[in-house]
Image (spheres, rainbow, N blue to C red):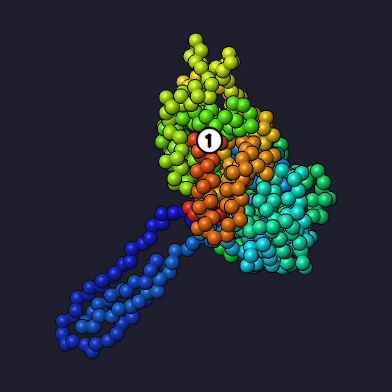
Amino acid sequence: MKPRSIGLLSALVVLSLLAAACGPTPTPQVVEKEVTRVVPEKVVETVIVAGTPQVVEKVITATPEPTAGPVMGGTFIYVLPGEPDSLDPHKTARTDAYNVMRYLHCSLLVQDPEGNYVPYLAESWEMSEDGLTWTFHLRKGVTFHDGTPLTAQDVAWTYTRAKDPANPGAAGASLAAVDSIEATDDSTVVMHLPQPFFPLLTSLSDPAFFGILSQKAVEAAGDDYGRQPVGCGPYKFKEWVTGEKIVLERNPDFNWGPPYAHQGPWYFDQIEYRIIPETTTQVVSMEAGEVDFGAVAPSDEETIRQTGLFTLYPIVYPGTGPHLQFNNSKPPLDDVRVRQALNMAIDRDVLVKVVMQGQATAQYGPLSASTIGYWPGVEYVGYKYNLDKARALMQEAGYTVNAAGMLEKDGQPLKFTLKTMAGEETWLKIAEILQEQFKALGVEVQLEQQEAGALVADEISGNYEMGMMQVGWTDADILYQMYHSSMIGALNLGQVKDPKLDEILTKTRTTLDPKLRQQWVDDAQRYITEQALMAPLLSMVSYWAVNNRVEGELFSTKIYQLFLDDAYLVK
């Protein structure tokens, strides 16, 4: 709940001082004085009765100020900086799609504001002693948006479909650790694993990419499902106007929310996602009070704060942080000395001051500090800015400086193309500074801006040399997904094939003892950093702006999530 300033009346003590009449003292008596008024707390009124030595105290019961509770109605306007490629969770890994799908679908379990795993579609679950079998018991009475009941068969079918290598969705990377999923009856799902998988519950608590689908609805819609999804979440799909908006409407039958929220339909009539790719236009819309929620870059934080229209929640995104992705399979980036030199040529303090205006910290490892499993040791292992050492490494790799002061090898100048996302101004500013810093090393870099979908597709396929990227994830398991060789063609954008690293990353998943698992996670971060498989840049502090006409939202500093389950709109 966002803080509100409410003025309260002070308690009053009334003294009635009446002069005593001359003459004999009358018989003492008790006089009750009725006082009618609204007071915010219990008060004691002292009454001195004329002609008596007796003081009577009258307790007046508090009458609290009327308060407005949650109300149904209104449209919550959500700024979407990119247009989803699909709303089929098994066909996309995009953040903009995630932001829509998380209210369309429900997961088996979910994390509460404290980061605990709590029931959602599954009332309970248990793991076998060897960690190879997980059993989930579903709650009854859940229906999809088309009215059909949700059963364990839908769960088994959903996750089997997500596992299919032909489906590029984000869930496949985690579910690859599961051998099979079966429905033993209408309300029981059993997962069989070939080896223990530590982060399984973290994955299954994501209602967007791990939401349960209706087999009937998916098969009926065919290839059109991504544009007309059917879920069982608090909101139903209404319309998608390409390039303009996606609209969801309240699910009036929703009565299976998690235990930390009220039970019953959500309060907004609709959630309207306005597709606004340009940062400048996003800020203008916020200044005009036309939207209810949007992400705010540090450079725009003061502008939005001065409007007085929004509550700003600071966010340190878990996951990778903005980083420079290398294609490790392409020469000369397959040479660790070249990658290390490029890391040493980056003055991250300049990025913090110039691009982020001090609202970020330099990052030297693959994970941001807010990610579960982050290892602080990377601050010492990571490559700091040192242009002299960078030049020495390039010389060791066989490069010389030509007459123009640029590096070349066998008469060929060293050139790279760095791809970044069109409309993402912060990334573009970072890329422009990197371009200048690499030039100081003697490396020519050309910048190429691409639409988000094209950029992600090129990095997945390996059709690039360098690219700006950021991957959000709450747990260090993102390292497995980004660097294990089995993930090439999915989230292994760096095209990394390293048997030693594969072994370490496998241990991060199969070790169930939390302390031992953390040691393997630390080893993975050390190895990725030392091998310079990417160039970490920043841990960004950005903001979520929530319009002050929204009440009841809850922001968690444990998992950096905004909960809208109990949110409503006021005039």
Q: Depth check: give the residue in front, 232 or 390.
A: 390
The residue lying toward the viewer, choosing from 333 and 147, is 333
Left or right of residue 370, residue 134 in this image: right
Considering every residue shown, the one lying at the far top of the view is 403
Horizontal and vertical percent position of residue 290: 56, 40
Q: Is residue 5 above or below residue 315?
A: below
Would you say residue 348 is visible in this rendering?
Answer: yes
Residue sticking out furthest to the right: 220
Secondary structure at badge 1 equals loop
The picture quadrant where one finds residue 308 is: top left
Vertically, is 279 above or below 161? Answer: above
Q: Is residue 240 above or below residue 143?
A: above
Give the amino acid type for the residue marked by disc 1 in the picture.
Ala
- Residue at the (68%, 44%) spot, across then down: 486
- Estimate the x, y position of residue 554 in percent, counting from the top left: 51, 55
Left or right, residue 571 beside residue 237: left
Percent across and percent down for residue 104 are 68, 52
Q: Which residue is mark 1?
A: 532
Residue at the extreme left of the image, as rendered:
23
The residue shown at (61%, 45%) is: 502
Image quadrant of residue 354?
top left
Residue depicted at 23% across the width and 83% down the height? 54
Which of the 4 image quadrants contains residue 324?
top right
Residue 239 horizontal/vertical position (percent): 72, 44
